[in-house]
Amino acid sequence: MTEKHHLLTNDELEDKFSTCDVPAVLFTHEAHLRLSYIHITKYGLDQATKNLTKQIADCDNKYGDGTKFNKTLTVASAKAVHHFIKKAKATDFNSFMLEFPQLKNDFKGLLRTHYEIDIFNDPIAKQEYLEPDLLAFG
């Protein structure tokens, strides 16, 4: 089943997300991966990380109570996507996801190879970026 974010072009998804005009049905894990892919391939890892952390926090404040944003998870996610982009033969997001299905199917497991601490629930990890305590991102 195709996710609804695929109804938007890369530019449309990026624009809608940057203004927090993203319907909840589009705001999936795969859509986050796609946004990371778009930003990293357009702006490089450093600027992509700045863009994504600001925009995800802004959307959390707009649509929620501001407690779901997790800085460590956001930065680590961008670093993981960047790692796979560097290894990829794929030149578009759909092919990228086919090449590296673990990004969608076992993302928590992937991040657990880098972190012993529970970055998904740690209150400090939500507020500031914690470097991996097991395996650095390559």
Image: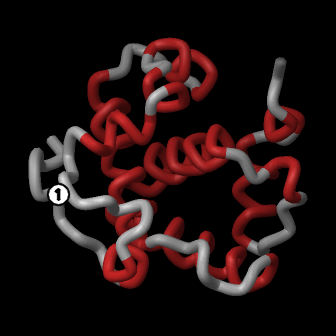
Q: Which residue is mark 1?
A: 132
Q: How is the image coloured?
A: secondary structure
Task: State which quadrant residue 123 falls in.
Answer: bottom left
Residue 2: % across, % down:
82, 23
Residue 34: % across, % down:
61, 41
When the figure is inspected, residue 97 is found, relative to residue 98, above or below; the finding is below
When the figure is inspected, residue 83 is found, relative to residue 14, above or below; the finding is above
Q: Nearer the viewer, residue 127 or 55?
A: 127
User: Which amino acid type is shown beneath numbered disc 1?
Assistant: Pro
What residue is drawn where x is 42% and y is 76%?
Answer: 126
Q: Nearer the viewer, residue 75 or 19?
A: 75
Say few, some or many: other residues with alpha carbon within 10 Å of mark 1 (under 14 / 14 to 19 / 20 or more).
some
Q: Quadrant of the C terminus?
A: top left
Residue 117: % across, % down:
23, 60
User: Left of 7 or right of it: where is 121?
Assistant: left
What residue is drawn where x is 36% and y is 35%?
Answer: 109
Task: State which quadrant residue 16 falls in.
Answer: bottom right
Q: Nearer the viewer, residue 94 or 128?
A: 128
When the figure is inspected, residue 99 is found, relative to residue 111, above or below; the finding is above
Q: Nearer the viewer, residue 132 or 79?
A: 132
Residue 130: % across, % down:
23, 70
Label 1: element kind: loop
User: Left of 1 or right of it: where is 73?
Assistant: left
What residue is drawn where x is 78% and y is 74%?
Answer: 19
Give the number of callouts. Answer: 1
Q: Quadrant of the N terminus?
A: top right
